Image (spheres, grey):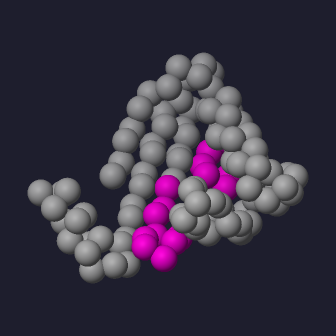
Amino acid sequence: MEIVRKMNVPASFLYKTIIDSVLSDIHTQTGKKISEKQLKGFKYVKTFSKNSKATIRIEDITNNQSYQYRTTSNKNDFMVAYEMRPLTEDSCELRYTEKMESFGYMDRLHLVGQIR
């Protein structure tokens, strides 16, 4: 899935908002305080519920331009990418992309049913 939207904020503001959220999530999940410079390649386990955990890996990060991460569990692999392109000083284009691969046979059947 891909969504492209014009945002009425500078690309730098949108990027900082996303990164601040990521750093907060890492701190909440791991207790570690890391910097933006340490994000690329960083992996941690996130607990979604009592019985649901996944490994999150920051795959790519480019200051004020892009952020990409992958969430992998025993059921699926989920990739999300944000790309920001300045349009004017006060606006940008956000391109949000997500891709999912399911590992279980029943999960794949369920996804096929959702697509149709």
Relative to 116, 43 lies left or right:
right
Q: Is residue 69 in view from this perspective?
A: no
Percent across and percent down for residue 104 are 34, 78
Residue 4 found in image quarter: top left
Q: Quadrant of the C terminus?
A: bottom left
Q: Measuring 67% from the left and 29% from the top, which residue is drawn there?
A: 13
Q: Measuring 42% from the left and 55% from the top, which residue is drawn there?
A: 98
Percent across and percent down for residue 36 are 80, 51
Q: Is residue 39 in view from this perspective?
A: yes
Q: Is residue 32 magenta?
A: no
Q: Measuring 53% from the left and 70% from the top, which residue is drawn there?
A: 72
Residue 89 found in image quarter: top right
Q: Up-down: is 111 above or below 22?
A: below
Q: Which residues are magenta?
A: 61-80
Residue 111 found in image quarter: bottom left
Magenta segment's dominant SS is: strand
Q: How many numbered circles does the render carry? A: 0
Query: In front here: 100 or 107?
Result: 107
Percent across and percent down for residue 26 are 75, 54
Relative to 67, 32 lies left or right:
right
Query: In front here: 101 or 7?
Result: 101
